[in-house]
């Protein structure tokens, strides 16, 4: 088990390392002169020279990369040009919005999708299955930002139940916490439901597949009722492919937050990176991209760890 | 009153009639055999008793178990019966256990469910039961997972689950078909002991008359969902009054007629066709722990033997003894770790694909699985002609068609089959196709890896005849890999007994099989069921 | 998800396909969307390059069945032209994914050893960059545009196809008919071409329709963010962006481009599901 986990950990670290090379080369080598790109064509020679020094562009490539990597590891993401503050501070501030949003969305989609998927699998071919999977089929096709627009129109514009956008900040009181949470409801739902549709479909097909396995028949031959076999024997085996998809979904969810934050004008990482692009603030882009890539890799590592919990075959023999 | 009474049971699934009319009655403590070829409805009969039929199945007639009308019983009543009064064992031990639950959990689960025992009590009963089926706590603690056990051990766990609550009826659906003969013997012995100890009835489903002859009191033979014959096992099998019974019995003891072994060119005086010397194959084993050293598993261990032109050689051994690895190395599909393989005087180990062409042309292969042996997307012409790729001069389209047609005729298929797809053939016909593909380049040696073990007895007899016939007509030598001594006895001259990677005994087939010297060969022989011998023994018991 | 090689001859498979409801509905929808895109090259109800501010934000009417936008352009005409963009981006992106991913995946499966390990680790790296993130990086350097969207989505598709092709091929290599081909002296390239590719074609086709649908969704998202197709070229995602600020006054602006996306993606997914049912004999028995 430790051998397996150490191997996965090593792979994750190596992946992260290669990914950092990719990000560095795309954003610092490809543009030729990043300082020129950031300041634009009309920049004064003095400003250019100052920025070049600040970014260390006069130094060899390898040294710059190592500095940058070292900074990343110690939490120094460099200084934003447009905000003139350390990138790490900007990121921390924005994470307070993006992280809860992603977490709520993931939780929501999981607690909707898995019961629906198992339920549909248990009643496959019946009306409940047809309806649930029909809805999921449509749900998979719905772009989350369009769904967000519809939600805004119905719940914010027409019914005025929740704010249409913006974020009041978490504040110190329970009341302000609640206001902040309210601002995240629609964004979380619009992120979660299309994902839930995908997850429900995967859960259903994984469960249907498992229900056809020989050991399900063995369990039923023991006299266990169908329902108990479904939850005690089938679900855990079906979770193995479901976990894989959840890991992949997290990447989509992160990408999704970038879009959804723009729909709801939420001051999260998505807005930050988006504004950084329009202002050509490469240092911010670099930092945020790296952070997002790292979290995708981290989640995949977590998924690998979950595998060993669910599947004893990965824990190594005696 | 009978424990189980099945009357005029019918079953249809999605419009096709699986069972037409099945009548079986089992008395308390009796062992009933249910025999039939694949597709005859054996398993569906068993699942009807358990009422675990696939969705869309419709059953008719009557199944009465211990005073309960099964077909009309509600699901809750069936749940009370299953696992408590009726236990069931399945064919495929590798997939019959839940991979994510420990064996202790899986055995204790049924005990807890039916008796309401607390966890500790259920576990101690599970422990006792596992101990009884030959998995003592010291070596096999309850916390073991199925993947940590071998096939035979898993089947023991399945038996423990089925017998944990001492059911009145145990249904065993081909319980040993997936196991080798030695394991088969052990499992059958265990089943018999369990039946005797608790006085339960056993419904033993099998395609193997020898197994049934040995185990059962009475016998029901079915075909196409209907009972052909039923009665006392010994009587039925020794009298063979019903034509189908006779056909089955003859097929399972069939020995193909063969021309005398000593053909011109054969015999040790000629140059050997294949010479294997000191052949070894190691596989790296992933270290179990972080600090464990990477180890090796030696699948084939310094094996040496020769095959002469026209000779038919059997390579027998238990599953996992290294037979198939050896075959793959001879076929140059796997590289030896050390040792040499000389075919027609040429070394073939470690050669390039180009250099192997002449050897490949003269050495072809027939596999076990008649379903997996063919690319489902190609027609017969292309499939059978595939080895012609090895010809130095590729035959033209017309010539190719002629060659394929000729090969088809030689294996008893019609040349008109040339444009069909493999799925349009039955299992036996597909094995004929595989043989046609193997002989199209006129090879000197055919390596056949368990070529008949997936076939029904009557088909098996026909394919064995074909092999014998081709050996006579074409003078092709065989290396027959099999775990079934009956097959070895039927068509080979020489036998090699393999055990844990080594060849432990070699000699003329008759001599080795009648007078085995090595422990491994003795164990194989003692375990192999033999219809004739069993009947003679049981008749003697009955009269004496 | 695994597809067993298909044992059915072509004709029976076609009949099976046409009696499969998902397949049929998916085929009709997908065909209709492609047809709409093709027709838009020759004819649209209105000329969308001509702005008519007097007609701005009209509701639904017989003249403008889907209404008009803030510049007085006919929404229906824009949706027709937008289909071109979506389909073109998706075709090229899936083409890149298949064209690069399938050879890589089958090669890794045939070669095994280090080649396989390198490919799988490279896949891990690529999977760490969702399409949107790649697009963000590319746009940060080269500025926004449809080509960047294609590249970003294409890059994302490569590891998907590599993985599917590899998994499919790996399952086939130990099969006995492949061993028989090897015993017939056929090399890895020839076996891949003759046996592996035809037998994983169904798997790839199904994945292709799924990726096509995902590409359309991704393109819409990128265009919505302004990272994809640039105005004046109409695209469904961009139309939704324009609709957002006017959602209170003219909700129909948001409704129809979104429906266009949903219907197209739904059609493709139905087609994929149908194909899988038709090609996978195991699933067929279950129905």
Image (cartoon, rainbow, N blue to C red):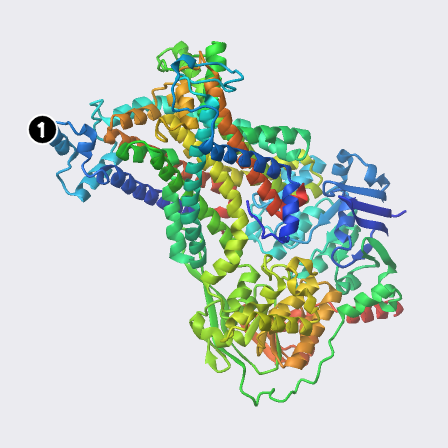
Residue shown at 70% from the left, 47% from the top: B162
Q: Secondary structure at mark 1?
A: helix
Quarter holding residue B419: bottom right
Q: Position of residue B383 (x, y in %)?
A: 59, 64
Up the image or down, A155 lies above or below B386; here it is above
Q: Is residue A71 left or right of residue B344?
A: left
Q: Position of residue B368 (x, y in %)?
A: 62, 64
Near-viewer residue (A235 or C238): C238
Quarter holding residue A239: top right
Near-viewer residue (A50 or A225): A50
Quadrant placement of the N terminus of chain C: top right
The chain containing the residue under callout 1 comes to: A
Near-viewer residue (B422 or A116): B422
Q: Position of residue A241 (x, y in %)?
A: 52, 40
Q: Position of residue B265 (x, y in %)?
A: 60, 88
Quadrant placement of the C terminus of chain C: top right
Residue tagged 1: A46
Q: Is residue B65 visible?
A: no
Q: Is residue C79 left or right of residue B177?
A: left
Q: Is residue C204 visible?
A: yes
């Amino acid at each position: 088990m430790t051998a397996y986990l150490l191997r996965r950990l090593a792979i994750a670290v190596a992946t992260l390392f290669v990914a950092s090379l990719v990000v560095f080369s795309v954003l610092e080598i490809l543009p030729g002169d990043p300082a020129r790109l950031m300041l634009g064509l009309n920049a004064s020679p003095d400003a250019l020279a100052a920025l070049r020094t600040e970014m260390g562009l006069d130094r060899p490539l390898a040294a710059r990369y190592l500095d940058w990597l070292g900074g990343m590891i110690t939490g120094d993401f460099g200084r934003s040009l447009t905000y003139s503050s350390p990138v790490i501070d900007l990121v921390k501030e924005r994470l307070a919005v993006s992280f809860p949003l992603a977490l709520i969305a993931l939780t929501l989609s999981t607690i909707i999708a898995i019961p629906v998927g198992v339920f549909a699998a248990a009643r496959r071919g019946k009306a409940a299955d047809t309806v649930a999977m029909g809805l999921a089929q449509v749900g998979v096709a719905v772009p989350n930002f369009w769904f967000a627009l519809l939600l805004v129109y119905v719940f914010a514009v027409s019914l005025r139940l929740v704010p249409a956008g913006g974020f009041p900040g978490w504040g110190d009181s329970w009341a302000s916490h609640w206001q902040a949470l309210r601002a995240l409801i629609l964004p979380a739902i619009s992120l979660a439901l299309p994902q839930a549709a995908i997850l429900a479909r995967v859960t259903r097909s994984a469960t249907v597949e498992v229900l056809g396995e020989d050991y399900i028949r063995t369990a039923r031959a023991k006299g266990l009722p169908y329902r108990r076999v479904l939850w005690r024997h089938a679900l855990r085996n079906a979770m193995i492919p479901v976990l894989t998809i959840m890991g992949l979904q997290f990447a989509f969810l992160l990408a999704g937050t970038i879009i959804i934050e723009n729909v709801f004008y939420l001051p999260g990482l998505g807005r930050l990176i988006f504004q950084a692009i329009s202002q050509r603030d490469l240092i911010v882009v670099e930092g945020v991209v790296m952070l997002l890539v790292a979290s995708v890799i981290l989640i995949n590592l977590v998924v690998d760890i979950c595998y060993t919990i669910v599947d004893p075959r990965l824990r190594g023999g005696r | 009153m009978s424990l189980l009474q099945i009357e005029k049971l019918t079953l249809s699934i999605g419009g096709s009639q699986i069972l037409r009319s099945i009548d079986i009655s089992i008395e308390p403590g009796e062992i009933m055999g249910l025999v039939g070829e694949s597709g005859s409805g054996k398993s569906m009969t068993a699942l009807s008793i358990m009422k675990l039929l696939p969705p869309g199945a419709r059953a008719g007639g009557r199944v009465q178990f211990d005073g309960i009308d099964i077909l009309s019983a509600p699901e809750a009543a069936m749940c009370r019966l299953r696992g408590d009064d009726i236990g069931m064992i399945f064919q495929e031990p590798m997939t019959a256990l839940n991979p994510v639950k420990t064996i202790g959990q899986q055995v204790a689960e049924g005990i807890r469910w039916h008796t309401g025992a607390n966890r500790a009590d259920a576990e101690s009963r599970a422990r006792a039961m596992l101990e009884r089926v030959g998995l003592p706590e010291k070596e096999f603690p309850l916390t073991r997972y199925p993947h940590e056990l071998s096939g035979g051990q898993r089947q023991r766990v399945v038996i423990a689950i089925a017998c944990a609550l001492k059911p009145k009826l145990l249904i065993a659906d081909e319980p040993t078909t997936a196991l080798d003969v030695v394991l088969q013997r052990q499992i059958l012995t265990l089943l018999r002991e369990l039946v005797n100890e608790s006085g339960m009835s056993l419904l033993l489903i099998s395609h193997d008359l020898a197994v049934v002859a040995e185990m059962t009191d009475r016998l029901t033979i079915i075909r196409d969902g209907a009972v052909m014959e039923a009665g006392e096992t010994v009587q039925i099998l020794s009298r063979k009054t019903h034509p189908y019974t006779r056909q089955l019995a003859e097929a399972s003891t069939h020995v193909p007629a063969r021309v005398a072994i000593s053909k011109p060119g054969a015999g040790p005086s000629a140059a050997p066709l294949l010479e294997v010397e000191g052949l070894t194959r190691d596989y790296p084993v992933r270290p179990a722990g972080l600090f464990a050293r990477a180890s090796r598993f030696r699948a084939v261990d310094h094996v040496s033997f020769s095959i002469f032109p026209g000779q038919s050689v059997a390579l027998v051994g238990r599953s996992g003894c290294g037979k198939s690895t050896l075959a793959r190395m001879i076929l140059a599909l796997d590289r030896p770790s050390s040792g040499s393989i000389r075919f027609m005087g040429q070394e073939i180990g470690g050669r390039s694909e180009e250099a192997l062409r002449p050897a490949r042309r003269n050495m072809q292969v027939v596999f076990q699985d008649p379903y997996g042996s063919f690319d489902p997307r190609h027609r017969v012409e292309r499939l059978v002609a595939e080895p012609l790729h090895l010809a130095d001069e590729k035959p033209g389209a017309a010539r190719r068609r002629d060659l394929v047609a000729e090969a088809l005729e030689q294996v008893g298929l019609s040349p008109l089959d040339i444009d069909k797809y493999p799925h349009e053939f039955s299992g036996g016909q597909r094995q004929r196709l595989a043989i046609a593909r193997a002989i199209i380049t006129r090879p000197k040696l055919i390596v056949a890896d368990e070529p008949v073990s997936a076939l029904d007895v009557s088909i098996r007899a026909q394919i064995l005849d074909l092999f014998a016939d081709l050996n006579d007509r074409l003078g092709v030598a065989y290396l027959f890999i099999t775990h079934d001594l009956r097959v070895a006895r039927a068509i080979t001259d020489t036998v090699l007994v393999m055990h844990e990677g080594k060849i432990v005994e070699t000699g003329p087939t008759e001599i080795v099989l009648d007078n085995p010297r090595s422990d491994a060969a003795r164990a194989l022989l003692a375990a192999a069921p033999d219809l004739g011998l069993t009947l003679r023994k049981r008749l003697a018991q009955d009269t004496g | 998800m695994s597809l067993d090689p298909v044992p059915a001859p072509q004709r029976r498979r076609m009949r099976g396909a046409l009696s499969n409801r998902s397949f049929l509905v998916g085929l009709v929808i997908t065909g209709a969307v492609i047809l709409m895109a093709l027709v838009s090259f020759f004819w649209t109800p209105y000329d969308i390059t001509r702005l008519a501010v007097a007609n701005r934000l009209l509701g639904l009417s017989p003249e403008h069945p889907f209404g008009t936008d803030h510049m007085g352009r006919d929404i229906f005409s824009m949706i027709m032209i937008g289909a071109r963009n979506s389909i073109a981006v998706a075709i090229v992106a899936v083409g890149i994914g298949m064209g690069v991913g399938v050879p890589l995946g089958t090669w890794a499966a045939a070669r095994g050893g280090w080649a396989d390990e390198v490919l799988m680790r490279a896949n891990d790296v690529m999977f760490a960059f969702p399409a949107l993130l790649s697009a963000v990086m590319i746009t940060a350097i080269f500025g926004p545009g449809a080509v960047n969207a294609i590249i970003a989505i294409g890059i994302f598709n490569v590891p998907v196809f590599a993985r599917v092709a590899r998994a499919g091929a790996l399952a086939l290599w130990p099969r006995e008919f492949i061993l028989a081909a090897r015993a017939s002296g056929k090399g890895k390239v020839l076996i891949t071409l003759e046996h592996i590719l035809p037998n994983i074609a169904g798997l790839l086709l199904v994945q292709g329709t799924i990726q096509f649908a995902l590409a359309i969704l991704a393109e819409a998202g990128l265009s919505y963010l302004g990272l994809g197709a640039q105005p004046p070229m109409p695209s469904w995602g961009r139309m939704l962006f324009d609709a957002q600020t006017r959602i209170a006054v003219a909700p129909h602006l948001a409704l129809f481009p979104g429906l266009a996306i949903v219907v197209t993606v739904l059609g493709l997914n139905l087609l994929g599901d149908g194909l899988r049912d038709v090609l996978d004999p195991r699933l067929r028995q279950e129905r």
